Amino acid sequence: MFGPVDASTPRPHDRDPGLRWERRHDFPPLVGGFGAEPGAPDVRSPSRFLFWLMRSMGWVVPAMTLAALSWLVPGSLTPWLLGRAIDAGILGRDPMATLGWVALLLGVIAFGVVGGILFHTIAVRMWVISIHGTQRRVGRKAADLGHILGRRVPTGEALSISNSDSDQFGATIDSFGHVIASALSFLFVCVLMFSTSPTLGLVVLVATPLLLAASLPVMRPLTAAQTAERTESSNLTSLATDIVAGLRILRGIGGEQTFARNYERQSQKVRGLGITLGTWQGVVEAISVLLSGILLVVLVYLGAQHMLAGELTVGELISFFGYAVFLVTPMRTFFDFAQRWVQGLVAARKTIALFGADVPWAPRDRQVGERPVLRDESSGVEVHPGEFLAVVSADPEASAALADRLGRYLPSVTGEEPELEDLKGRKLRLARKERAKARARQALADAERAAQLWGVTADGVDYAEYDLASLRERVVVSDTGASLFAGTLQDAVDPWGTHTREEAERALRTASAEDVYDGLPGGWQGRIDEKGRGLSGGQRQRIVLARALVRDPEVLVLVEPTSAVDAHTESRIAERLVEHRRGRTTVVTTASPLLLHRADVVAQLVDGREVARGTHVELQAHPDYRRVIARGMEDDNE
């Protein structure tokens, strides 16, 4: 099946040195805030988070601002140089002076061109840092939270933060550096104008803030529109993710049209909010053009009046006209920054909800022993070292809940969140607040639950006293909700990349998944789609089982590991699984006679409590046990 194993055979777990975590280049660029040991983000408020994000980039943001300044200041100095060339050179009929001022003007323009190139180069670097850094941090946070993630933020929120908000942060920080440089160049122009005409300089200095203040009333509806559009867009992403994940099931039950209508309705809702948002953005843009134009007209008019009164020369008038044209750029930048900052705050508000979420487990120093004796107080089930224990229950949820408790996983959230469909205005805002409060209550309940005794002991000590990482290392739970990620078969079976080819082959054989290896072009390097979409349900289940077996934990808890395979395959897995795990502790929740017959001990649960324990043959004397097994066989045959 796998071919001979010798020195000349490429081993699937022999990594190419070029693929190791070694930085051989500078893409994507990394900085301290996104390194292996980053500081905690400031999640006290959206604005604090944005400033933390800028600080985490180190020298990049200050360098980008200085580069933007070197790009803009030459543009503000050009009108003054042009005016001097006209007055001293052309009107003064001095060719050498004209050539001197023109040469200086060309030098300043060239300096500005270089500054513009430098600014845009650093801005792209900053943007890449923002996108890749945020995506990496979201990935790490999702891994840290694990099953807690869905209890802290809405489904699809992490995806929206990674895909959309990371780009928005880049746009916001780019605009921030640009607006700082624009403000400094604006002040520089004011100084030049004051040196020529204090009256016109004062007009610009006073009129500009007033014109900007005139646009403030539209910022609040813009913020509200941005928030609404971002929230519903995230909901649309969540809906799309759920539809894609359950597409096969939807087709099986004929629910495609229903979900298609739901998606279409939500998509139209996002479209409508996008139009509203675009309208307010257009209003802000129109105000920007209007007020910039008013400032330009006023300066040109006042400059012409001063020249007619003999207070300005022709060159100074031309300079003032150039100043007025230049000031349109800072004015437009101020308005653009206002929009970008609003968008950044909306994105940051969603992001800090994720980054500010913590697991409820308190840190502990106690480590779980190598061969622990486990006892679940709720069910009374006791698991002994090296034992192959099968758990049978008429209620599969009770068996799954036992597995969650043994792995120290919080139960699924069953309460429904307030629906936002067809809500508008005040009702929509109240529903969003209620949703946020519900999640806050859930987080508080999780923290209170984690602070209490867990109800499962290892060697007589409650789980709450153990270090969670140590527990996860010793006790591994593989349930029916386990996912496969896009990548090679090697990555699917050994995502840690720490096991040998022989170990991977043995796990694949125990899971009876040789057909997956044979069916993929390239064997171990054959590609598997996200969630294993190119595989059958049984193949996906067997690859998940192989992955759990490769991990080889001291205690392995398997939830219905053969529910999607045929009887012949299940028989092979049962025989091989017991041999593979010999000497290790294994707990399997199942109603399959093939697995139950191979188990050392079978525990029967009724209403979540253990009522009988023995071998499969011994328990068949109990009518309740036989009914559970018979019902399980009927479900398998349907």
Image (cartoon, helix red, strand yellow):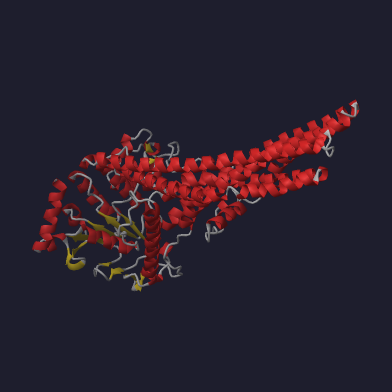
Q: Can residue 277 be seen in this view?
A: yes
Residue 495 appears at what percent x and percent y? 41, 48
For this view, does 189 lie left or right of residue 338?
right
Residue 133 appears at what percent x and percent y? 54, 48
Closer-to-camera residue (120/617): 120
Closer-to-camera residue (399/263): 263
Vertical position of residue 456 compared to residue 114: above or below? below
- Residue 243 sits in quarter: top left
For this view, does 129 lie left or right of residue 607?
right
Q: How many marks?
A: 0
For this view, does 142 lie left or right of residue 129?
left
Vertical position of residue 379 compared to residue 194: above or below? below
Closer-to-camera residue (201/176): 201
Residue drawn at (70%, 49%) of the image:
206
Closer-to-camera residue (503/242): 242
Q: In which quarter of the image is the N terminus?
A: top left
Residue 304 appears at what percent x and percent y? 77, 35
Vertical position of residue 290 compared to residue 143: above or below? above
Vertical position of residue 463 compared to residue 310: above or below? below
Q: Quadrant of the C terminus?
A: top left
Residue drawn at (84%, 39%) of the image:
311
Q: Is residue 37 visible?
A: no
Residue 510 appears at what percent x and percent y? 29, 48
